[in-house]
Amino acid sequence: MRSHPLPFVLLLASAAVAQCPYYAAGTISAGLSRFNGGEDARLVYVDCLQSIGVVKAKFGTTNGSTNLNGLPLKIAVLDDPTDDKNPADAVLVAQVTIPGGVTGGNTGQWQTYDLHALLGAVVPATGGMWVAVGVTYPSGTSPGPGSIEFFNNIAPGTQWLATDSGGVGVNYGSMSANSLVDIQTGPGFPPGSWVIQVESGAEYRSFGAGCLGSAGVPTLAGGALLPTIDGFGFMLFDATNLFGLADFMLLGFDQIAPPVDVGVIFGVPNTGCGLVVVPLLITPALPVVAGTSSFGFSIAADPALLAVSVIAQTASFDPAANAAGWTVSNGVRAVQGY
């Protein structure tokens, strides 16, 4: 078998692609408007979070002429009791009117809404959930505040538009009372995504899979301490099935999707070991005892860290494992929050 020193610091040309629940990359293609005005709610379906803690949205287009700032704005979180990706039967869990209404209109800048601050707590997720961003605006508002990204195609059922009936406002308590359109299949909408992002409270989320090495499949998990930003947070990762010769933690902010095979990196045949993080930091060799190791650090009490994710993965020098001589674990996304 060929073995190689760790060259990950020389990577990567591959683009990082955001995954669930980051439906929108943030590039605004168009802004929606209604001839007669009224309230529209953009809904996104989220089924991969333990809680709903942060909502981000963009309003209008960067070349818009109408001032959108100050328009009435609501955020609502609803349960999808049948997980059928149809909001007609959605059950309202939480709703809040945003003080000051829309901000950042036509700037292309993300506007962040901290549900912990607005509601007093993050909203627990119970399977599939809907997050609605609703804006009320007068007739003739063009381009309107409903921003859409046409180049980010999403499966049918994950992005809907709810429009009020008779100008009375969107009924979040009974979504079937509104006009509902699936924007992937409905008339007048090319496939795309609302320019909305949803994040959890403090949480670890594992994704992907490790590859078989001499000590088994390396596995990474979040530790017992949550990555909170309340001054008591600690980001902790626990690894098992490490080979123990030279094992490293790779840390970064961007996820690679699809993963890059380690064989591609070393110029050998594919190994089935996929790199899932763009590493900004590679730790010194981890201390390994009986194939296990932990790595962690404290988190500052800084609101600017809210919803910031750190992506982690282990890499193990294992000359007998494959032609590249390296194995990797699954990835873990550690979300900083409350």
Image (cartoon, rainbow, N blue to C red):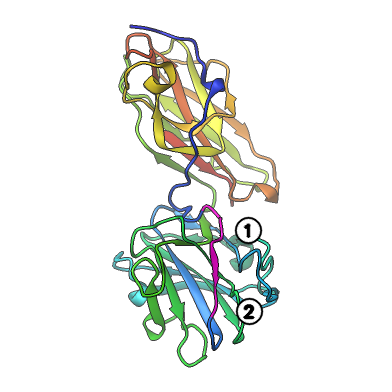
Question: Which disc is residue 72 wearing?
Answer: 2
- In which quadrant of the rendered view does residue 213 lie? top left
Q: Secondary structure at mark 2?
A: loop
Residue 200's place in the image compared with 260, above or below, is below
Residue found at the far bottom of this picture: 166
Viewer-nearest residue: 38 or 301: 38
Residue 214 in picture, x, y percent from top left: 31, 14
Going from N to C along the chain, the mark reached first, 1 or 2, is 2
**Magenta-colored stretch includes residue 5:** no
Cα separation between marks 1 and 2: 17 Å
- Circle on res. 110: 1
Label 1 is placed on what type of residue?
Trp
Residue 245 at what x, y percent from top left? 44, 9
- Does residue 242 show up? yes
- Give coordinates of residue 300: x percent, y percent: 69, 41
Depth check, mark 1 against mark 2: the one in front is 1
Vertical position of residue 148 compared to residue 323: above or below: below
Q: Is residue 151 left or right of residue 209?
A: right
Q: Are marks 1 and 2 in contact (CB under 8 Å)?
A: no
* Left or right of residue 112: residue 191: left
Identify the disc placed on residue 175: none
Task: Decide whether the magenta segment is chiefly helix, strand or loop.
Answer: loop
- Mark 2 crowd level (few <14, some 14–19, many ≥20, 10 Å Cα): some
Q: Residue at x 29, y 67 (%)?
A: 82
Estimate how packed mark 1 is, as few (under 14), some (14 to 19) or many (20 or more) residues with alpha carbons within 10 Å.
some
Observer-nearest residue: 231 or 137?
137
Per the rendered image, the range of residues in magenta is 25-33
Label 1, secondary structure: give it. Answer: loop
